[in-house]
Image (cartoon, rainbow, N blue to C red):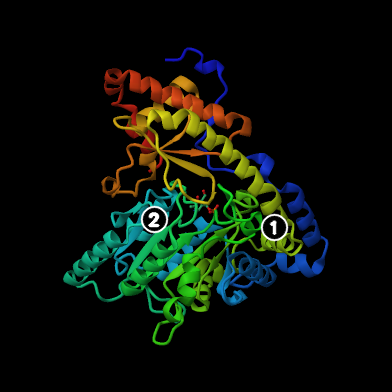
Amino acid sequence: MNGSSTARALIDLKKGWPNPALLPAVQIKTASSVSLSNADIFVPGLSYGPDPGYEPLREHIADWLTHFYHPSTRIPAERICITGGASQNLACILQVFSDPIFTRNVWMVSPTYFLACRIFEDSGFHGRLRSVPEDQEGVDIEYLRKALYQSEMKARAEGNTQLSLKPTRPWRKIYRHLIYAVPTFSNPSSSTMSLQRRQELVQVAREYDACIITDDVYDMLQWLTGKTATQDSMKHAHLPRLVDIDRTFDGGAEREGSDGFGNAVSNGSFSKIAGPGCRIGWLEGTKGFVWGNSQVGSSRSGGAPSQLTSTFMSNLIESGDLQRHIFEKLQPTYARRYQRMISAVEEHLLPLGVTLPQTSRDVVGGYFIWLSLPAPIQAEEVAMRAQQEENLVIAPGPIFAVFDDEKAVDLERKVRVCFSWEQEAMLAEGIQRLAQVIGSMQRNQPQQEKATPGGSSFLVEQYR
Ligand SMILES: Cc1ncc(COP(=O)(O)O)c(C=O)c1O
């Protein structure tokens, strides 16, 4: 053990929060003061609101997303409803569009954003969450297709062909399957799904009556790794979302003969680009899906969440302050933070045998870097020692396993490190401390085997 650990400053590379210096408090103060000084804004803002949310914000989001994602036709406001953020709205989607019996399984690209697991369990899916592995291109389509087929066969054999618990309503449909993914700059794997996999995923979802729910919360936090694109292109998404593909692919989500609800929806959020405490986001999907989502009981009683904050966000987009914050502050700052961390990884970890995913990408982004450790080093052991010996906190891969389907994808040698939270000046030192731990375990492997039992599952259990 390194005797100096207690004297050294804590370095936290686990926390997936924005650093306080990146919160746009001044801009939000201005936007809130515009709202609260004008009765035309604060009266609706402080009252109950419409089910799909504050109309001016829906319009502004629709225009802003049209500009960023560049779909072939403008996104109409009817495709957007206001939510309490990606997590809150995942629960709403499940309340309206899933049934704890008829909906067979939730298919989660693994490693997954683990906090989503509990949201699915709360809606009755305990024991029916399934891992789907990913490779360098994204979700493994053949694995998913086979597993969906088997799940359908099982449901039929069990006679699960009728809707069971929820009443039929004109604004809803109950999907047979749910697929959950973070296709761009994923949490935790930092990976981006290729265009081809996105198209194939939409196709599979249509074949099996699945709803793909994506958390597209990091899309705007992007920057270039090389010099192959111009800086201006960072003002536009480099890939369409699954919801964009579903909107137009092969006749589109509202093609003749379809039920019009679509097979992909996008959960957007202001958490990563303004502040998580705002607890506000949006859903994009077909007009039918968006209307149905807004009819969830908790929105029928008083309107969409975050009505007052909606007026602030509306001003923030209308004034251009949010876009300036993203393009002039967040993108360059996160790019610099990422660069510091990745340079340290290249210098200190790659020589030890650590590897990175998708190394040939031109565009990277998000909050995280995902590391694969060399055998036989185990992530939970590394995380425990890092804390004890180096006063360093990291996230071991097993916490990102899908609940109750942990064994399907091996995460024992994966580690997530975050560059958004810790002081920028400490990022490289954090990676050096990690290298210290891994190096000492490699030099001393017999002791590592002795030290393994005990604390490891405790680390993971904290997240269940
Ligand atoms: C993939 C993913 N989805 C959702 C969230 C939370 O979003 P919100 O704050 O909008 O609920 C996070 C935050 O870490 C995330 O990484």
Q: How many marks?
A: 2
Q: Is residue 290 left or right of residue 327?
A: left
Judging depth in this view, the residue of 31 and 446 nearest the camera is 446
| Along the viewing direction, whichever of 301 and 431 lies nearer the viewer | 431
Q: Which mark is residue 323?
A: 1
Position of residue 300 measured from the top left corner of the image (x, y, whole percent): 55, 71
Q: Is residue 394 above or below residue 332?
A: above
Give percent across and percent down for residue 298: 53, 66
Image quadrant in which the N terminus is located:
top left
Q: What residue is at 76 percent from the left and 56 percent from the top?
A: 32
Q: CA distance from mark 2 to mark 1?
A: 30 Å
Query: Is 347 rendered above or below residue 119?
Result: above
Q: Is residue 277 left or right of residue 32?
A: left
SS for callout 2: loop
Q: Which mark is residue 137?
A: 2
Q: Secondary structure at mark 1?
A: helix
Q: Quadrant of the C terminus?
A: top left
Mark 1, ligand 1, within 8 Å: the answer is no
Judge whether residue 343 can be spotted in this image. Answer: yes
The quarter of the displayed image where residue 311 is located: bottom right
Quarter of the image for residue 450 reads: top left
The answer to whether residue 462 is above or below residue 143 is: above
Specify the amino acid type for callout 2.
Answer: Glu
The amino acid sitting under disc 1 is Gln
Looking at the image, the residue that sits furthest to the bottom is 256
